[in-house]
Image: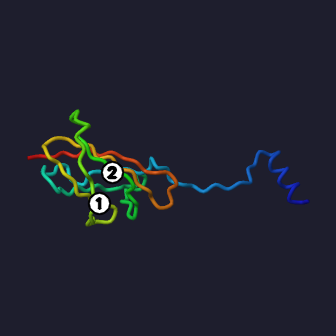
């Protein structure tokens, strides 16, 4: 009975008795290109880094659940290349093998699940392929 009284008193005083966990939001993460440029060609390896923006630290152990590379920055969104994950060299870095058949700008879209983050982290990185 005492607990009910305390609960009612707390509500009357405008005090919340619930606790909330502080979670990072999916917007607190950002994918960044590792290299400013890469050579065009078949079986090219491109890498991105996933960073926790408030701390600036790379995020290791994320599970990449969706990828797409196309040439939409150069108005050729139909020009899509296959993407396959490969081993990365550094923690927080994610590497992929793809085809960049011509010089130009490519949009690399990614979605990832980060441990402890309920929302899916999505990002886009523009890659530049050169001759």
Q: How many marks?
A: 2
Residue at far right of view: 1
Residue drawn where x is 21% and y is 35% of the image = 74
Q: Are marks 2 and 1 in contact (CB under 8 Å)?
A: yes
How far is disc 2 from disc 1 in space, using C-alphas? 9 Å
Q: Viewed as shown, does residue 81 lie left or right of 3?
A: left
Q: In the rendering, at what x and y percent does residue 85 appear? A: 29, 60
Residue drawn where x is 25% and y is 44% of the image = 80
Residue at far left of view: 131
Give residue 60's quadrant in the image. bottom left
Foreground residue, 123 or 10? 123
Q: In the rendering, at what x and y percent does residue 2 appear? A: 89, 60
> Which secondary structure, mark 2?
strand
> Which secondary structure, mark 1?
strand
Which colour assignment does the render follow?
Answer: rainbow
Q: In the rendering, at what x and y percent does residue 28 appear? A: 44, 50
Q: In the rendering, at what x and y percent does residue 35 appear? A: 21, 53
The quarter in which the N terminus is drawn is bottom right
Give residue 21's quadrant in the image. bottom right
Pointer 2: what residue? Answer: 67
Residue drawn where x is 31% and y is 56% of the image = 49
Pointer 1: what residue? Answer: 85
Q: Residues within 10 Å of mark 2 (few under 14, many from 20)?
A: some
Q: Viewed as shown, does residue 107 lie left or right of 112?
A: left
Give residue 47's quadrant in the image. bottom left
Sequence-first tag of 2 and 1: 2
Q: Viewed as shown, does residue 8 lie left or right of 108?
A: right
Q: Which mark is residue 128?
A: none
Q: Residues within 10 Å of mark 1 (few under 14, many from 20)?
A: some
């Amino acid at each position: 009975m005492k607990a009910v009284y305390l609960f009612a008193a707390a509500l009357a005083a405008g005090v919340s008795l619930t606790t909330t966990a502080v979670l990072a939001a999916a917007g607190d993460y950002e994918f960044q290109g590792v290299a400013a440029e890469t050579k065009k060609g078949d079986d090219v390896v491109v890498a991105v880094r996933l960073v926790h923006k408030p701390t600036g630290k790379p995020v290791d152990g994320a599970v990449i659940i969706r990828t797409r590379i196309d040439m939409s920055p150069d108005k050729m969104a139909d020009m899509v290349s296959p993407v396959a994950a490969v081993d990365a060299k550094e923690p927080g870095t994610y590497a992929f093998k793809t085809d960049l058949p011509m010089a130009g700008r490519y949009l690399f879209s990614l979605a990832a699940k980060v441990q402890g983050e309920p929302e899916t982290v999505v990002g886009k990185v523009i890659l530049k392929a050169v001759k």
